[in-house]
Image: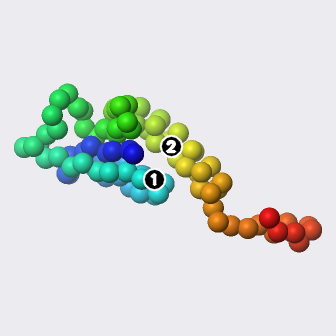
Amino acid sequence: MIELHRLHNDLKADEIEDQLKEMVVAHRVHRYSEENPPSGDISLPCLREGEKIISGQEDTDRFLEELAKFMKVQHTISSDACYIDPETGETC
């Protein structure tokens, strides 16, 4: 599961969280305050997937782009839709 670690009042983290919601991807959000930062040397905001930590603007943007492409394919494959061939009228 993807985890977003973020500060409460962070516009960039808001954008990341909105993107995860828009992709309809399972995720958890961990919110921190300036007074109660995460332990260790974690630069916020960051994403965590298993043992992999993604931070920094460029890496985060690349991860979210790849995730969006993956989720688009997954939603297409797993959709509960049936298509009608406009030429033959046959259904899937």
Q: Residues within 10 Å of mark 2 (few under 14, many from 20)?
A: some
Residue 67's disc is 2
Q: Residues within 10 Å of mark 1 (few under 14, many from 20)?
A: some
Q: Is residue 10 visible?
A: no
| 22 vs 77, nearest the viewer | 77
- Label pair 2/1, CB-CB below 8 angstroms: yes
Residue 42's disc is none
Quick one: which residue is furthest to the top in this view? Answer: 41
Reply above or below: 19 against 79.
above
- For label 1, the residue is 25
Residue occupying image coordinates x 52% and y 47%? 68
Residue 53 position, x and y percent, is 34, 32
**36 displayed left or right of 68:** left
For badge 1, the amino acid type reads Val
Residue 42 position, x and y percent, is 23, 32
Circle nearer the N terminus (2, 1): 1
**23 displayed left or right of 31:** right
Here the colouring is rainbow
For badge 2, the amino acid type reads Leu
Reply above or below: 55 against 86.
above
Residue occupying image coordinates x 64% and y 66%? 80
Label 2 to label 1: alpha-carbon separation: 9 Å
Quick one: which residue is furthest to the bottom in this view? Answer: 89
Residue 8 position, x and y percent, is 19, 51
